[in-house]
């Protein structure tokens, strides 16, 4: 699977995300739902948070986790745009290399200037 | 197609692209090291680049502008952090205002370029890392590309899985 989806590649993390889509939940409420330590759940939440998929908000003594669907789209879009920019550049590089391989004498701006 | 693989790492805001070329590394290096060649591939055909300064030494900089269909000019810069011809280059890549002053509200990426001989040709690896999530989002706001719907659909499908 594309590493882009690393944050989403884990069953627990996807589950956390689904539960948070339905409404904000405290980390302790979330943790109660999984057969793992509070710290382990916190780590999963941190991965999702770093990926921009959820945001944590402190309310009183509780840490509430909620999803940021717009952030999912934005982060994905940014990497897509960077990819499309570099793909275009690599295609142009390949064409330049092919051109100069065919006509090494044809282009005055090419060739080593030694 | 020259592009061999593309990997997008959501956690680390990193794009890694690998491409293979038939040309030797020295030749591929010239695409970066010769400003006249660089400007033939850096900008898209609708926004061709004109390179002004070009100093590929540590601490050196490259400055350029891209000219749009309406004659609009968009300035950009590189700050070179390390360079080992013809195998590696590292620089930060950003935009600038009309006077060439680096723009703080535009995205900055750090670009690592590696060239290696492979099967008589050259393997090019480009790793591009956003400095921060905010900067990544700035790129989106600039709306440099289209066609996100499919990507969003894939994400939806994954979330529904």
Image (cartoon, grey):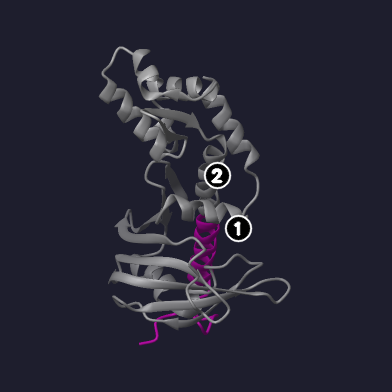
Residue B2: tell me if it is visible. Answer: no
Residue at the image position 71 percent from the left and 71 percent from the top: B69
> Residue beneath label 1, please?
B142
The quadrant holding residue A49 is: top left
Subunit of label 1: B
Marking on residue A74: 2
Q: Is residue B9 above or below residue A40?
A: below
Q: Position of residue A65 (x, y in %)?
A: 44, 29
Classify mark 2: helix, strand or loop: helix
- Res B21 quadrant in image: bottom left
Residue B36 image point, x, y percent: 50, 79
Prevailing secondary structure of the magenta residues: helix
Left or right: residue A102 compared with residue B17: right
Residue furthest out toward the bottom: A114
Residue A101 on the magenta segment: yes
Residue B88 belongs to magenta span? no
The relative height of residue B140 versus residue A20 in the rendered view (above or below) is below
Is residue B66 in view from this perspective? yes
Q: Position of residue A7 (x, y in %)?
A: 40, 32
At horizontal 40% and vertical 30% (from top left) the residue drawn is A60
3D distance between C-alphas at marks 2 and 1: 12 Å
Disc 1 packing (10 Å; few <14; some 14–19; many ≥20): few
Q: Secondary structure at mark 1?
A: helix
């Amino acid at each position: 699977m594309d590493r882009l989806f690393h944050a989403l590649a884990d069953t627990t993390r996807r589950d956390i995300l689904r539960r948070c889509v339905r409404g904000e939940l405290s980390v302790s409420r979330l943790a109660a739902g999984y057969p793992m330590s509070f710290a382990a759940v916190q780590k999963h939440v941190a991965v999702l948070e770093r990926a921009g998929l959820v945001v944590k908000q402190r309310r009183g003594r509780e840490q509430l986790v909620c999803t940021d669907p717009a952030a999912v789209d934005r982060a994905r879009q940014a990497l897509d745009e960077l990819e499309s920019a570099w793909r275009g550049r690599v295609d142009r590089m390949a064409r330049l290399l092919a051109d100069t391989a065919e006509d090494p004498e044809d282009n005055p701006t090419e060739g080593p200037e030694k | 197609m020259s592009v061999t693989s593309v990997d997008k790492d959501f956690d680390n805001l990193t794009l890694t692209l690998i491409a293979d070329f038939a040309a030797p590394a020295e030749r591929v290096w010239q695409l970066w090291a010769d400003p006249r060649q660089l400007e033939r591939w850096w900008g898209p055909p609708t926004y061709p680049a004109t390179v002004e300064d070009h100093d590929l030494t540590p601490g050196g900089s490259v400055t350029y502008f891209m000219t749009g269909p309406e004659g609009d000019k968009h300035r950009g810069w590189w700050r070179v952090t390390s360079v080992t011809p013809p195998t590696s280059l590292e620089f930060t890549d950003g935009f600038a205002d009309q006077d060439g002053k680096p723009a703080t509200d535009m995205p900055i990426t750090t670009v690592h370029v590696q060239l290696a001989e492979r099967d008589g040709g050259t393997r090019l690896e480009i790793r591009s890392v956003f400095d921060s999530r905010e900067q990544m989002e700035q790129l989106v706001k600039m709306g440099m590309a289209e066609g996100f719907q499919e990507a969003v659909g894939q994400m939806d499908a994954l979330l529904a899985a």
